[in-house]
Image: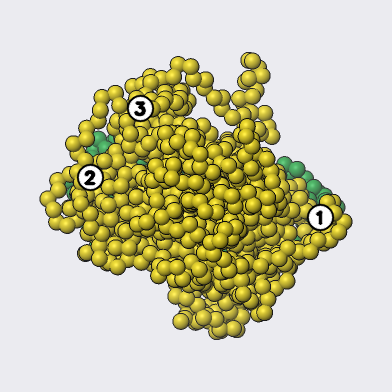
Chain colours: A yellow, B green
């Protein structure tokens, strides 16, 4: 390893890195603002200045920026020489000229990088006596609060939003000491990654708006390592709690998956945990249909009547963790268990797992996807179904410019230089989807095909790659691109709801991997534990349709966190409603299935329980309780253990704690044998202590509930995990899976994450080994090739294309106020031409008529849509009964009332409201 | 003395069209180059001429060009030549003269430069306020296309060049070559970090040469008449002639073409007619607003890059601003700092926030609110903002040059203002 001399101390450095990274790796405190480990250097803040000496004889040296200086073996630097320290002080003093010093009322206070750096530099006295510049703030939507006066102009927000995440509606404006970061005019930020501005901003310009409404300081938050429930990517999160409320969610660094960034669904979509519609107590349905709250013991004794000596069937859920799903199956037996996936989902994911366990291609982590130099997306809108993957693909297309930079001798972290050199040169990205996608702007080729055509495209492509005679121009282009790549990546998934698309993607990847062993294949699934639910299925388990068919032979249904109205057709739901079956439902929020139930049991949310989720690649990850469930809520696994113990059945006896459940699962079948290694169990101790989920500065522990009771309650005890609701213990060097928050002396902001990394932007210092539940035997996926070409479009009929929406399609997050505001109305999507043909325009109503029903939906105009197809928003109440691929008729709804655009509040009079007042 | 650059520009000038330009040896250099010289020959002629960039930094043009990858060393694609006509240095008005009255001289120089460099696209990035220059250049370009001096296969040589005039949307910083490139790309006019230099990765990421108007005009004559001839033009160590200007309270402010190495005294006293009656020369900025003050002690220095550099200032653009004894130097510096603070692009901290801080301290002093410690603060700022490498580009260090030299030569004026005994009789700045 090369070495450099810093203030006489020799430090080992990594080839090619910059001096700032080298210093941070060596544990030296060199302050910085504009540099970001994922976004590289631009040299704008000048804060990481050091003095570089040309030789041993050079005693004066010259000032260079750490972040812009590539380390070379034997180079000599000083951080501590007066020249350097004085310069860094001057920088902070300048940055602070216009800063309002409003730390006490700023929500960044206590986790502010600017505070940390100011203290680190040692700046104390102001010499500037002039006026401070002020700015007008903007309304940026329900998620992000804007406070421009605090800005220190580090340009990170713009670089993240525009350069990294591809946003178009935000950036730097004006010049000199009046640079303004915002939108052209007030309005909701369009990017689905806008929430990262909260963490990217080194101070309080962009803050978490929902959090502001129920604010607590970082040091007062109780946190736990958690996993996002928003989709199947499995981003790691760090939710924080106080006063029994889930306050906010921060990104939790995971080297393989999310790195530093999560999407807005993940960051803001968990507000439902605090909703008034949460179920607090067990409920028993009265004759007239309403529910009465009953105590837990009464509920259980009542439930016993429906469980003992009856045929009980359990329905699991892809949005519940692995453990309760497993317990349900283990307790009732496979023949009385359904995974809770809809039939189409179940068969699609079954095929998907078969592909993953046989493909000859590699199944990449999100980070590995960033290394792809050619990408084919087949029928999956990843920006909406797996947003974090889309962000990774957006980085992957930059590989072309990275290789240009390498050839030109420009280091990868020289962000502006690499972008200037590469300009619009992107690695090829071929997007083959039925409708527009957020990645279209970086795609080299866009093929807009209907799902049948997409599958055919994939099959032809595989044939072409295999040396077949295919003349189709699109296929030949894609084949050339993939064959020329060093690390091609094929991305597909099941959200297109066409089973053959998956098969064709698998064939493309397998064929390609015959000639290129670095071929990657990544397949998306919809829900946080879709994979877990699917893996629990076997040849004996029931499908949901079979459960409905067998209703008259079933006495009792136990439904685990599953709203069946999202998975069953209208007639099946009617059958369920009409049946005499007693239904015990466990869930977090009210939904239509609870209304069909005889008894409702209040389940703890993800923030109040622990469990394991299996992500899209088959990676098992554990989340931990942030706080104790309130009222009579219990984690579902505990309810199931209690229900099972009511009868003589002893299948779930002896399960005293969560670890026992995990052990039982691990011993239940070979494929689960590693599941107890996902995270350390509750017996784990770090230097003799449990890991604190409160910071060591946590305040008011003994007084915070004094307004309720003057008696000081004992701290709740977390008996299930290695974490403690306590300030005691060390938050340092623990296993990666047990890091509830990042903090290090002098580093109060999220930048302290580097103290937990083995090196800057590297893996965790103490990584818990990955547990992958699916590994490929590399036999290759074999499938029959189907041709769909004969299916011509029917006259006057439109084929339904599902359109996943980051806001609104996912069940739980759409119960969060801000998310539902952003989701807007359910919609049908048409191109301008399609809308013209139907004589409608954006915002009009359209009657969507299928064999069973008709419903009126808002028209949304999209840039592209396959011929003869109409998109519909997935997961909205009004569209639950629409079936992808089915044909519908469309006619204009003459009675439709157009919704008014949201009034945007500003701190200045907006033109719109001015006009309205003036002209009525 | 032979006038080279202004040979077509009379004392009461009229614009020179193509016919008139050709009548006075115009486009002979181009025809000669195409007939006799390879691009490599041209490059060595420019190198041998020892021409130094006339935009302010004085970097040897031949050396700058030698960094452009040529032949197989260059990846396939465009190469660009950009003429920096964004003349915004305070006190500078030389390029305008050349463009307004002899546009073909610049265009011929650009065609020759592009031929040398293998550039196939050329831009004239011109200050938007130069509306007359813009129109005359555009007219001249049309004439050139008609004559096949521009366009495809120029005069049958196989060499092709497209040329465009791009009026700038404004900002002083656009004169910085990488900020200019960003502006040309439609981006914010922030300078780029160097390396990589534009010669390797410039406009649209491609090899790019940015040269000043006057530099490119010189190329016309160097190729036509040779390096040896060019070297004989200078009076001192630098070769060629130069447009020198004088502004301030002299009898005859203006712009003259003189040999390099002409002594300052000749320019101020002979050309500009000396100080106005009743005024003494107190100091002067030799090459525009971002150069260090020199004083009457330096009047006999030759206007050569190294000579002026050795005296602690810079030749810059060669257009002097005179400070007389009745004008407050603090006010003059404040005026300049105000300009530079306003023209900061806002990218890096010392410039964006440091210059307004300096401005505020100077305003306090100038308006009688100064404190003793303000002088320490100013010295601190000069060191902090002024160091090369401290900032992202040369704007802020340039802005510090008049201040640091004013503190050196006119310290007592600062002190008097702070003590309340000074007065700024003739205001150099709005108070």
Q: Which of A517 and A562 lies nearest the eye of the viewer?
A: A562
Residue A251 vs residue A346: left or right? right
- Residue A456 disc label: 2
In percent of the image, x 14 and y 48: which residue is there? Answer: A470
Can I make out residue A177 in this image?
Answer: no
In percent of the image, x 61 and y 71: which residue is there? Answer: A682
- Residue A851 disc label: 3
User: N-terminal of the two: label 3 or label 2?
Assistant: 2
Q: On the image, which quarter does residue B250 sit in? A: top right
Residue B119 vs residue B61: left or right? left
In percent of the image, x 83 and y 58: which residue is there? Answer: A703
Measured in 3D between alpha carbons, the distance from the residue under mark 2 to the one under mark 1, in whole angstroms, is 63 Å
Q: Secondary structure at mark 3?
A: loop
Up/down of B327 relative to A238, above or below:
above
Residue A903 vs residue A810: left or right? right
Q: Secondary structure at mark 2?
A: helix
The subunit carrying tag 2 is A
In percent of the image, x 76 and y 64: which residue is there? Answer: A715
Q: Which residue sits furthest right?
A: A710
Quickly name the residue at label 1.
Answer: A705
Up/down of A454 relative to A316, above or below:
above
Residue A668 vs residue B224: left or right? right
């Amino acid at each position: 390893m090369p070495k450099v001399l810093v203030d006489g101390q020799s430090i080992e450095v990594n080839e090619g890195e910059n001096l700032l990274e080298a210093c941070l790796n060596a544990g030296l405190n060199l302050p910085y603002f504009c540099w970001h480990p994922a976004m590289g250097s631009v040299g704008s803040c000048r804060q990481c200045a050091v003095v570089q000496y040309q030789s041993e004889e050079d005693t004066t040296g010259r000032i260079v920026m750490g972040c812009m200086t590539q380390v070379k073996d034997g180079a000599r630097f000083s951080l501590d020489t007066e020249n350097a320290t004085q310069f860094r002080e001057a920088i902070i003093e300048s940055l602070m000229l216009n800063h309002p010093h409003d730390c006490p009322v700023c929500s960044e206070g206590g986790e502010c990088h600017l505070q940390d750096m100011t203290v680190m530099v040692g700046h104390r006295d102001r010499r500037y006596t002039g006026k401070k510049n002020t700015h007008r703030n903007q309304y940026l939507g329900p998620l992000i609060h804007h406070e421009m006066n605090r800005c220190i102009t580090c340009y990170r927000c713009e670089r993240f939003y525009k350069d990294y995440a591809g946003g178009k509606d935000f950036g730097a404006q004006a010049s000199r000491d009046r640079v303004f970061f915002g939108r052209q005019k007030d309005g909701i930020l369009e990017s689905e990654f806008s929430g990262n501005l909260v963490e990217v901003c080194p101070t309080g310009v962009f803050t978490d708006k929902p959090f502001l409404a129920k604010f607590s300081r970082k040091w007062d938050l109780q946190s736990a390592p958690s996993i996002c429930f928003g989709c199947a990517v499995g981003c790691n999160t760090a939710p924080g709690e106080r006063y029994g409320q889930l306050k906010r969610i921060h990104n939790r660094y995971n080297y393989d998956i999310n790195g530093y960034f999560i999407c807005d669904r993940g960051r803001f979509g968990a507000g439902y945990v605090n909703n008034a519609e949460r179920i607090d107590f067990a409920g028993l349905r009265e004759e007239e249909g309403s529910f009465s709250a009953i105590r837990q013991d009464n509920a259980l004794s009542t439930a016993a009547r429906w469980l003992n000596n009856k045929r009980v069937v359990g329905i699991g859920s892809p949005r519940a963790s692995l453990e309760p799903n497993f317990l349900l199956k283990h307790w009732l037996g496979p023949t009385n268990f359904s995974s809770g996936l809809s039939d189409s989902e179940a068969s699609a994911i079954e095929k998907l797992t078969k592909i993953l366990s046989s493909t000859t291609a590699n199944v990449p982590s999100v980070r590995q996807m960033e290394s792809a130099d050619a990408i084919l997306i087949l029928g999956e809108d990843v920006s909406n179904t797996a947003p974090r993957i889309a962000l990774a693909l957006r980085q992957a297309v930059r590989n072309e410019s990275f290789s240009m930079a390498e050839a030109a001798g420009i280091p990868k972290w020289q962000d502006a230089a690499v972008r200037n050199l590469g300009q619009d040169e992107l690695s090829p990205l071929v997007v083959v989807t039925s409708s527009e996608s957020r990645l279209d702007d970086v795609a080299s080729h866009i093929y807009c095909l209907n799902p049948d055509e997409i599958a055919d495209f994939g099959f032809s492509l595989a044939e072409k790659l295999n040396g077949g005679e295919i003349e189709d121009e699109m296929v030949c282009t894609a084949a050339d691109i993939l064959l020329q790549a060093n690390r091609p990546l094929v991305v597909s998934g099941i959200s297109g709801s066409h089973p053959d698309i998956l098969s064709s993607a698998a064939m493309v990847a397998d064929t390609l991997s015959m000639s290129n062993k670095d071929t990657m294949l990544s397949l998306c699934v919809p829900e946080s534990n879709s994979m877990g639910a699917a893996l629990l299925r076997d040849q004996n388990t029931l499908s949901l349709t079979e459960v409905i068919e067998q209703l008259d032979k079933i006495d009792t249904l136990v439904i685990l966190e599953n709203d069946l109205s999202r998975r069953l057709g209208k007639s099946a739901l009617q059958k369920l409603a009409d049946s005499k079956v007693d239904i015990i439902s466990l869930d977090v929020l009210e939904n239509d299935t609870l209304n069909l139930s005889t008894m409702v049991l209040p389940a703890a949310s993800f923030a109040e329980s622990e469990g394991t989720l299996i992500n899209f690649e088959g990676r098992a990850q554990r989340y931990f309780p942030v706080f104790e469930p309130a009222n009579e809520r219990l984690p579902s696994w505990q309810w199931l253990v209690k229900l099972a113990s009511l009868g003589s059945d002893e299948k779930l006896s002896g399960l005293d704690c969560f670890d026992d459940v995990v052990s039982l699962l691990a011993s239940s079948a070979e494929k689960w044998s590693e599941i107890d290694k996902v995270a350390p169990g509750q017996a784990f101790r770090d230097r003799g202590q449990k890991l604190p989920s409160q910071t060591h500065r946590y305040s008011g522990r003994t007084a915070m509930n004094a307004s309720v009771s003057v008696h000081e309650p004992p701290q709740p005890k977390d008996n299930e995990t290695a974490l403690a609701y306590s300030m005691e213990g060390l938050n340092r060097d623990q296993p990666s899976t047990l890091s509830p928050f990042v903090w290090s002396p002098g580093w109060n902001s999220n930048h302290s994450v580097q103290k937990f990394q083995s090196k800057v932007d590297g893996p965790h210092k103490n990584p818990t080994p990955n547990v992958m539940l699916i590994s490929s035997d590399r036999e290759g996926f074999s499938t029959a090739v189907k041709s769909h070409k004969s299916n011509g479009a029917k006259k006057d009929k439109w084929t339904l294309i599902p359109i996943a929406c980051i806001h609104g399609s996912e069940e739980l997050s759409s119960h969060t106020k801000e998310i539902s505001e952003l989701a807007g109305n359910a919609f049908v999507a048409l191109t301008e031409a399609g809308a013209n043909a139907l004589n409608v325009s954006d915002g009009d109503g359209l009657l969507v008529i299928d064999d069973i029903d008709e419903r009126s939906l808002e028209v949304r105009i999209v840039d592209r849509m396959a011929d003869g197809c109409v998109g519909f928003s997935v997961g909205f109440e009004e569209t639950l009964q629409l079936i992808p691929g089915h044909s519908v008729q469309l006619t204009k709804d003459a009675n439709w009332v157009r919704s008014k655009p949201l009034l945007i509040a500003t701190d200045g009079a907006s033109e719109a409201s001015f006009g309205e007042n003036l002209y009525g | 003395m032979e006038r080279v650059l202004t040979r077509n520009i009379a004392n009461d000038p009229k614009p020179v069209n193509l016919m008139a330009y050709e009548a006075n040896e115009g486009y002979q250099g181009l025809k000669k180059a195409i007939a006799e010289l390879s691009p490599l020959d041209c490059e060595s002629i420019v190198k041998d001429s020892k021409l130094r960039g006339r935009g302010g930094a004085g970097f040897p043009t031949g050396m700058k060009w030698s960094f452009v990858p040529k032949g197989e060393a260059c990846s396939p694609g465009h190469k660009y030549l950009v003429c920096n006509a964004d003349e915004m240095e305070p006190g500078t008005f030389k390029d305008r003269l050349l463009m307004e009255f002899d546009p073909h001289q610049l265009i011929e120089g650009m065609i020759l430069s592009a031929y040398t460099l293998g550039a196939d696209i050329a831009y004239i990035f011109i200050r938007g306020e130069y509306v007359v220059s813009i129109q005359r250049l555009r007219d001249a370009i049309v004439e050139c296309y008609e004559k096949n001096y521009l366009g495809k296969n120029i005069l049958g040589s196989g060499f092709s060049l497209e040329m465009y005039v791009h009026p700038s949307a404004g900002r002083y910083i656009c004169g910085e070559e990488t900020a200019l490139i960003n502006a040309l790309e439609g981006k914010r006019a922030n300078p780029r970090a160097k390396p990589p230099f534009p010669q390797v990765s410039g406009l649209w990421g491609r090899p790019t040469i940015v040269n000043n108007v006057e530099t490119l005009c010189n190329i016309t004559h160097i190729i036509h008449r040779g390096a040896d001839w060019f070297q004989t033009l200078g009076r001192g160590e630098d070769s060629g002639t130069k447009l020198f200007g004088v502004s301030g309270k002299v009898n005859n402010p203006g712009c003259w073409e003189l040999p390099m190495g002409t002594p300052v005294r000749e320019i101020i006293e002979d050309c500009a007619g000396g100080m106005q009656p009743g005024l003494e020369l107190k100091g002067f900025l030799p090459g525009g607003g971002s150069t260090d003050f020199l004083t009457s002690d330096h009047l006999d220095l030759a206007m050569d890059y190294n000579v002026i550099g050795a005296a602690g200032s810079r030749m810059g653009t060669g257009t002097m601003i005179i400070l007389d004894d009745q004008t407050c130097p603090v006010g003059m510096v404040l005026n300049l700092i105000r300009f530079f603070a306003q023209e900061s692009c806002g990218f890096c901290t010392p410039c964006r926030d440091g210059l307004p801080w300096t401005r505020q301290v100077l305003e306090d002093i100038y308006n009688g609110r100064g404190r003793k410690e303000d002088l320490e603060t100013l010295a601190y700022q000069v060191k902090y903002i002024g160091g090369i490498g401290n900032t992202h580009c040369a704007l802020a260090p340039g802005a510090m040059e008049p201040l640091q030299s004013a503190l050196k030569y006119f310290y007592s004026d600062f002190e008097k203002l702070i003590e309340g005994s000074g007065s700024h009789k003739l205001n150099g700045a709005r108070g």
